[in-house]
Each structure stands twice: as C-alpha cells, then as structure tokens.
Image (spheres, grey):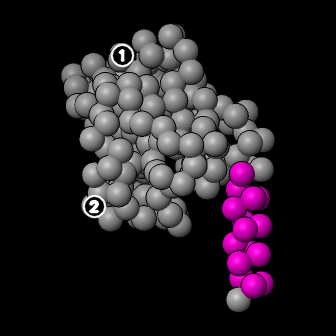
Amino acid sequence: LLRIACLARDTFGTARRAAAMTSSLAMNTESGVINLKLRPDSAPITCEYIVKAVKDGLYDGKSFYRSDFVIQCGLYPQKAPSNLSRNETKDGVFVSNTRGTCAIAHFDVPDNGNTEFFINLQANTHLDDVYGGFCVFAEVADDASFKVVDAIAGAVKANGSVKIYSITAS
C-alpha cells in the first residue's frame, strides 16, 4: 500500500515537471494564431495530457466546430486515444472559467474529459461547478490572440468550422 502511494505521488510529480517544461501552445488556424499560456499550477495532469496530444499531432488538420458561449475543438467525431484520469478543477490553484480561459470539455461525468477543449468567449463561472466543474488548463496569452478567438467565433457561426493547421508546444 505504501508503495502504491509513493508511485502515485511520483506520477503526479512527473506530470508537474513535464507540464512545467512546456509553458505555452501556439494554435495556427485559418483565422490566425492563438497563443495560449498553460496553467500547470492549476492542472498539471491536464497540461501534460494536452501537450502530449499536441506533440503527437492529434489536433493537426482538426477544426473549431462550436461557437456559442465558447469555441470548441478536439478530435470530434473521431474517438480520443485515451481519457484523462481525473478532473483537476479543484485540485490545484483554482482558475475560474472566465473570458479567454481554456477548459477540458466533458459530458455530465466529471472524470471523462479527453482531447476536446474549449476557449471561453465570456465569463462562464457556472462551468466552475456544474458536472464537477470544467478544468481550466490554459488562458489566451495576448490581445492579438483574443482577436483571433473572436474571429473564429464569428467564422464558425457563419461557416460551421475553422481549420486548425497545427498546434505547437514550447
């Protein structure tokens, strides 16, 4: 039992170190580039999961396909290779779902998130608690990126989707 607890602690520590090594993502879309600052202080396991998906090229050629109070992207309709092991909404430094934050999308079961994520277009603080909360793992990094986010929201409403050419981690 003690050995299992030590392994779990080491896995969590490893996730924090890995997420800390990558501090940002750049989403190259047909509407421009969105720079995102990762929040490993809030969600280290989630950051590691997303960075791995990015480095594996899982988002390349995918699209933003939803625009209402968020813009959402991911592998839909394709199935994700794996799910996150837990919802970190209340584990680390709490970050609310405010304009420009990025959170993991999930169904009404909190611990089934995967590669689907969204960028909040407005303050959506109701998402902090509903269905176990939607875990914030990043935030839009600059004003130019906010303009691209807003352009994507309009383009998805008008055309149904906006292509993601690639995402890079640095």
Label 2 crowd (10 A; few <14 / some 14-19 / many >=20): few
Residue at which label 2 appears: 108
- On residue 151, the disc is 1
Closer to us: 36 or 137: 137
Between disc 2 and disc 1, the foreground one is: 2
CA separation, marks 2 and 1?
29 Å
Residue visible at 61% across and 55% down? Answer: 45
Q: Residue 34 location, x and y as percent?
A: 52, 23
x, y (%) of residue 25? 62, 32
Relative to 8, say whether 150 is above or below. above
Q: What amino acid is found at the position of numbered circle 1 in the picture?
A: Ala
**Main SS of residues in magenta:** helix
Residue 103 located left or right of residue 34 = left
Q: Secondary structure at mark 2?
A: loop
Amino acid on which the number 2 mark rests in the picture: Asp
Considering the image in quadrants, where does the N terminus appear? bottom right
Q: Where does the C terminus fall, quadrant-wise?
A: top right
Kindly identify the residue that appears in the image at 38 percent across and 25 percent down.
99
